[in-house]
Amino acid sequence: MKLDNNGPLVSVVIPAYNVAEYINQTIASVREQSYKNWELIVVDDGSTDRTLEVIAESVKQIRQHVVVHHQENGGLSAARNSGVKLATGEYVYFLDSDDLLPQKRLAPFC
């Protein structure tokens, strides 16, 4: 699935577990990328806090393709594997839910 003709689609996969206080900033760092041909896949790995609610609110402002997947807690590897299965991009970029993506990080994929 390509969103435009300016380069390959990059699937950004964020596994999330009980990171309500961080995930909004993480998603914002993806939204603010200079390279715009990406999709966002956030896998909530059975969070018991407000993570899923914060994710739902944060992705409302994104125009690119977004998948929010909720699953039973299976750990980081299981969440990443779920994200890869949902990815449609030519490249997959893993981003931890408490990290920030520098603004031009996806630009090398152009």
Image (spheres, rainbow, N blue to C red):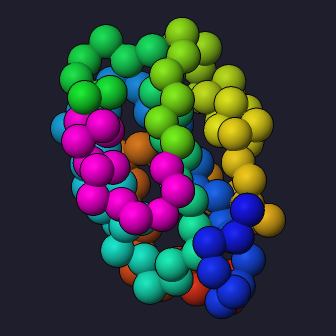
Instruction: Choose top left, top right, bottom left or bottom right for residue 26.
Output: bottom left
- Dominant secondary structure of the magenta stretch? helix
- In percent of width and height, residue 12 lies at 58, 56
- For this rendering, which residue is in front, 100 or 24? 24
Q: Is residue 28 above or below residue 36?
A: above
- For this rendering, which residue is in front, 90 or 78? 90
Looking at the image, can residue 34 be seen? yes
Specify whether 8 is left or right of 62.
right
Residue name at image x 58 percent, y 67 percent: 38
Magenta highlight on residue 59: yes
Q: Is residue 74 above or below residue 24?
A: above
Q: How many numbered circles does the render carry?
A: 0
- For this rendering, which residue is in front, 104 or 39? 39
Specify whether 68 is left or right of 1.
left
Instruction: Choose top left, top right, bottom left or bottom right for residue 4.
Output: bottom right
Q: Please identify the quadrant where the N terminus is shown.
A: bottom right
Residue name at image x 70 percent, y 48 percent: 87
- In percent of width and height, residue 35 lies at 52, 83
- In percent of width and height, residue 9 lies at 69, 70
Question: Which stretch appears magenta?
Answer: 54-66
Residue name at image x 73 percent, y 33 percent: 81
Q: Is residue 93 above or below residue 67?
A: below
Instruction: Choose top left, top right, bottom left or bottom right for residue 63.
Output: bottom left
Q: Please identify the quadrant where the C terminus is shown.
A: bottom right
Looking at the image, can residue 22 be seen? no
Q: Is residue 66 above or below residue 35?
A: above
Residue name at image x 73 percent, y 77 percent: 8
- In percent of width and height, residue 105 lies at 53, 78
Specify whether 29 is left or right of 75.
left
